[in-house]
Amino acid sequence: MNKIKAKWSDPIFLEQVSPVLELFTQSNIEMSNLDLSGIELGCSKSSVIQLRNAYLKQSKLAKINMSYSFIDCLIFESFLCNVDFFKAKFDTCLMSKSIFKECNFRKSKLVINADDAIFENCCFIDAKFGIITYGHEYGGRRTKFYDCDFTDAEFKNVEFRASRFYNCDFTRTRFISCDLRGAKFEGNKPTIEQYERMKIPEMIPEYNISNRR
């Protein structure tokens, strides 16, 4: 990982990718087949000045390596297909109305607002949602997940109200102090034991486990 991060301080590498970096401050962009691992988008402390105000609006990204990245920016009405976010950190990232198809979020940390976003065939194995937040400030409303893998994933202090989960894998998934009012699960469903310190969704018989430890 140190080598991945170090390249963003290399003047030669930065000169090579400069045309690409400039796209992150424009709307309606398209990019594909790039290695941008370790990139920092929207981070005020980023060593790459032009990325401090980065955003993705109504844009298309495909087959891009963004593993080990730090993302703190707007991703609005965009389409991302086969983007690798392995061990990425999303810090208060707004993903409203965007579509993520066959993206890899394995071992990523997601403090996000994904209102009206769609995730299709995405990998969330060992991912953590809202791990650094308190209350139900982040998550998403009316978010849709299709055929996603949440094996060993953790949802903590987030809301996914009125959201839909279609045929997702919830093997050893944990929901801790979450707000899932109005959420619906079709196909596979978490078991009662996978909910901690919260009221479980209505499609399972009412069972308040607010005192669960």
Image (tube, rainbow, N blue to C red):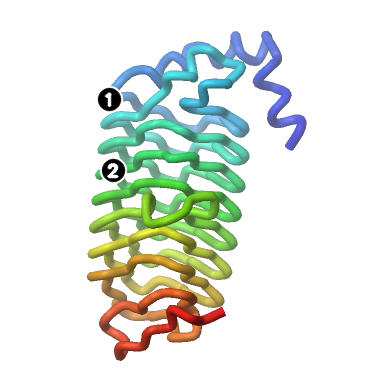
Q: Earlier in the sequence, mark 2 or mark 1?
A: 1
Q: Position of residue 53 (x, y in %)?
A: 42, 19
Nearest to the observer: residue 62 or residue 85: 85
Nearest to the observer: residue 2 or residue 112: 112
Position of the N terminus by quadrant = top right
Identified by mark 1, the residue type is Asn
Q: Residue at x 27, y 83 (%)?
A: 203
Local SS, label 2: loop
Up/down of 47 relative to 56, above or below: above
Q: Which residue is mark 1?
A: 28
Q: Residue at x 38, y 80 (%)?
A: 188
Q: Is residue 4 left or right of residue 15?
A: right
Mark 2 touches mark 1? (CB < 8 Å): no
Category of crowding for the residue at label 2, using alpha-carbon neighbours closer than 10 angstroms: few (below 14), some (14–19), many (at least 20): many
Identified by mark 2, the residue type is Ser
Local SS, label 1: loop
Q: Is residue 70 left or right of residue 53?
A: right
- Per the rendering, the mark at residue 96 is 2
Q: Position of residue 11 (x, y in %)?
A: 67, 9
Q: Position of residue 47 (x, y in %)?
A: 61, 17
Nearest to the observer: residue 51 or residue 37: 51
Up/down of 178 relative to 13, above or below: below
Up/down of 168 relative to 55, above or below: below
